[in-house]
Image: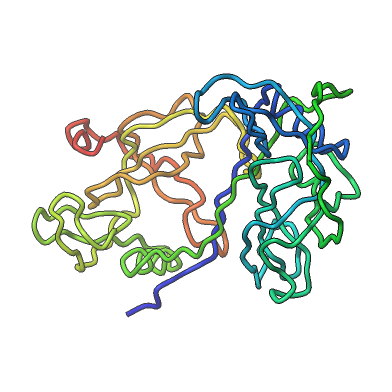
Amino acid sequence: MPEVLKAPLAVEFPFTRSLGPVQSAFLTGLRERVVLGVRTGDGQILVPPVEYDPVTAEEMRDLVEVAPAGTVTTWAWNHEPRRGQPLDTPFAWVLVRLDGADTALLHALDVPGPDAVRTGMRVRVRWAATRQGAITDIACFEPYEGRPAEPAQPAGHTGQFADPITGIVAAARLDYTYSPGRAQSAYIHALSDRRTVGERCPSCHKVYVPPRGACPTCGVATSEQVEVGPRGTVTTYCIVNIKARNLDIEVPYVYAHIALDGAGLALHGRIGGIPYDQVRMGLRVEPVWTEGARYPDHYRPTGEPDADYDVYKELL
């Protein structure tokens, strides 16, 4: 059996959101080395602040300034920091109740080891050297010997700053190792030999390309390999007018569903070698390979007469 493939894969996209007045004041305050919370209707001080009371759902605007020092309420040791985390050396994740606050803020604590962390220890904010209005303006927390003021009374704050932060961009990213499994590994290995291989369902006899290892209709395993194509028929298509990042293809171009000869399922492919406005349903096409490629670069017309609609209508 061919080796089952696997490869690292990252899914990433930026998420952009606007900020309401409370979140705007909180993040702008961090840029100015000020930590703000918000007072609820029953007098609780929430840090980080939220815009609506978690009990009554009423809008909250009563901002207060709390101290940049506080007390660890609980913690966990991170022995192997990951990409994008606050520190690149082992550190503790801590929940810190800042002096004057009634809730705890999650962040990193820079200490040499887990023996240096304990619930109840005093810590303070270590500010980032360059601040831009984000939670990362708090570089981390560090141990602190100072005692909280008695009593800790947070001062009111207008939330007004010059050049307030009105929006943020958060990068969502998922890193994982992907394995296509036995069936698709065989499909990819065949592509390296410029062959397209599917698998036939033993019940409905449909040939799936790419193969899935099981028939999604009948629910039975598939193992019989069937070579299909290389020619096929355009079943439907779209014209792409927006240039994708990192894709060196000039727009407009055509992306199509192509039913390879002998396949019971259409696959995706780009159509080239013909003006985009001449691509049509039923067009007969063949793959075009580039040197060293593991899959066709695009499909081009074969010059054959168009396929009859009845031939491919079930594959739309």
At horizontal 43% and vertical 29% (from top left) the residue drawn is 238
Point out the image quarter for the N terminus: bottom left
**How many circles with numbers are drawn on the protein?**
0
Q: Nearer the viewer, residue 189 or 179?
A: 179
- Image vertical order of residue 96 relative to residue 191, above or below: above
Point out the image quarter for the C terminus: top left
Q: How is the image coloured?
A: rainbow
Provide residue 13's location: percent of width, then percent of height. 60, 42
- Image vertical order of residue 88 relative to residue 235, above or below: below
State the residue lying farthest toward the bottom.
Answer: 1
Provide residue 66's location: percent of width, then percent of height. 78, 38
Q: Quadrant of residue 235?
A: top left
On screen, residue 123 versus residue 282, left or right, reads: right
On screen, residue 152 versus residue 92, left or right, reads: right
On screen, residue 8 versus residue 170, left or right, reads: left
Q: Nearer the viewer, residue 277 or 240?
A: 240
Provide residue 294's location: percent of width, then percent of height. 49, 62
At horizontal 62% and vertical 43% (from top left) the residue drawn is 247
Q: Nearer the viewer, residue 263 or 102?
A: 102
State the residue lying farthest toward the front.
Answer: 150
On screen, residue 293 versus residue 237, left or right, reads: right
Q: Quadrant of residue 101?
A: top right
Provide residue 173's location: percent of width, then percent of height. 59, 50
At horizontal 50% and vertical 29% (from top left) the residue drawn is 55
- Image vertical order of residue 79 relative to residue 251, above or below: below
At horizontal 86% and vertical 56% (from top left) the residue drawn is 146
